[in-house]
Amino acid sequence: MSGNFHIRRLALIGTGLIGGSLSLALKRAGRVDEVIGAGRNRKTLKRAYELGIVDRFETDLAQAVVGADVVFVAVPVAAMESVFATIAGHLTPEALLTDGGSVKRAVIDAAYRALGKSIEQFVPGHPIAGTEQSGPDAAFADLYANHRVLLTPLPENPPALVEKATQLWQAVGAHVEYMEAAHHDHVLAATSHLPHVIAYALVNSLGRLAERKEIFRYAAGGFRDISRIASSDAVMWRDICLSNREELLAMIDLFREGLDEIETALRDKDGEQLQARFANAKAIRDGLYREANNN
Amino acid sequence: MSGNFHIRRLALIGTGLIGGSLSLALKRAGRVDEVIGAGRNRKTLKRAYELGIVDRFETDLAQAVVGADVVFVAVPVAAMESVFATIAGHLTPEALLTDGGSVKRAVIDAAYRALGKSIEQFVPGHPIAGTEQSGPDAAFADLYANHRVLLTPLPENPPALVEKATQLWQAVGAHVEYMEAAHHDHVLAATSHLPHVIAYALVNSLGRLAERKEIFRYAAGGFRDISRIASSDAVMWRDICLSNREELLAMIDLFREGLDEIETALRDKDGEQLQARFANAKAIRDGLYREANNN
């Protein structure tokens, strides 16, 4: 239970949508006394302060984690190793170090390289929540309510620390589950990373048409929804894709097979096959997906 | 202006989402005295009657259009020619005949073949609105409010009849624009038909994974949105794709180029190019698209 869970000092490294929303949710729930924001961009930190996401801020990451009982790292995945290296020698011994990275193997590898003995304090995590927006202004306290958070604990983690990470997320209304890191990266390549690549590719493709202004003018709900995530932050997604490259390439191959099937049926004017492929997708989307998500 | 627009008798051929929503909207606005539903499936017609979409119904299409001042055909595109052939000799001379088909050239070709002299009464149209649901139960009066309707008038249409079609849609809150049929099919292949093929292909691909139940369980908002239209009716979309085959095949090729670019960058571990492609898509989605749609 997370009923008594309380943080004296939270160090938030990265104060954008993911980090900022965690802070706002913990503050609203009265679960944290003080939040220290840290990062490299003073302007972003200042904005997070103005928005009430952090109570004070530091551009010196090592300084920011001193005395913190929870450290949450929410920076683009490729920036994590340098963050870990900077803070490694400054963590309070009992502190929980966790993250919000969308890939887990690459982050864990970086943590092993950079954290040294402090690796036992690092409980890797991934909240399955977000929007296409980014930055402190995009943060909101309800982001994690009723969303899933996947923790991929390390063998080195003391169980009490995994429990602390669990309570952290439960305190903001999330449902915590545990998963092996490689399996996490496989599943997320399918449900999140591939869809983002498809959305980016679709918008780039149509943007190449001479009449693109008109095209977007006559786009209906289907296009709006399918392209929404193409507004996601480019650096964050560059890092995610490169960090989960093998799995993502395999998923792109799988998607091409699905696209080939439909294209071949269309080329062959094979209405029966076309209908069968569409009906198959509809059955899966209506059935399995709704069943799993109650919507 | 549509202020005085009034229909004595509307014949609705096809009483699903598209036809049913038009009827509900006209009824709510007090713009129609009587709605006759027509179609081949008595069960669907009976349901439309129970839902208040139609005041009575006929399975004899020719009978249904007798005495109607507006006839709206909202059946899958491949079924339109047979509908036109059946009703051709039974239309009231002054009646407006229009449709809701998602492709326009194929429907117009069918109309020329099947309608004979009545071709002048046919003003082709396409409301850019819909959901992934279908059937009478999916219909709702607000479907067309503030949505665009594209009319692709024929040279044979008397201007007064095009005006009547315009007022029909304005009466339910839609914004009417005019477009050449071939251009319509090109634009819609990009913004609607291609996104549907992509959504179907994506869901089929992931449905092939052994761990598909789990995959859908951990799907977040991005996947939910990108896959929503894969729940669309399979017969309707088979017809749309086959009826706009050349344009759609060209758009699939275009999309493949966009996907290839990203895949190549990922394969080459070219972070700079990957970020450039994502940033390009984000700029288009944030800029052009929002500009055109005010959202």
Image: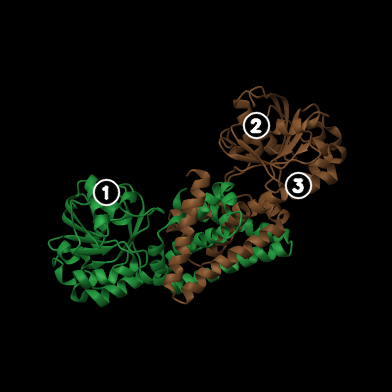
Chain colours: A green, B brown
Asked if disc 2 and disc 3 are in contact, CB closer than 8 Å, the reply is no
Query: Which residue lies at the image location 73% right of the left edge and 26% below the top edge?
Result: B9
Q: Amino acid at mark 3?
A: Val
Where residue A25 is drawn, which disc sits there?
Answer: 1
What residue sits right under mark 2 in the picture?
B23
Q: Are marks 1 and 2 on the same chain?
A: no
- Give the x, y percent position of residue B70: 74, 30
Where residue A258 is drawn, which disc sits there?
Answer: none
Q: Secondary structure at mark 2?
A: helix
The chain letter under disc 2 is B
Query: Which residue lies at the image location 61% right of the left edge and 52% below the top edge?
Result: B192
Q: Are marks 2 and 3 on the same chain?
A: yes
What residue sits right under mark 3 in the picture?
B107
Of badges 2 and 3, the one in the foreground is: 3
Q: Is residue A36 above or below residue B122?
A: below
Query: Which residue lies at the image location 30% right of the left edge and 55% below the top edge?
Result: A16
Q: Can you name the residue that lies furthest to the front here? A: A210
Q: Secondary structure at mark 3?
A: helix
Q: Nearer the viewer, residue A224 or A58?
A: A58
Q: Nearer the viewer, residue B277 or A102?
A: B277
* Horizontal side, residue B44 vs residue A2: left or right: right
Q: Amino acid at mark 2?
A: Ser
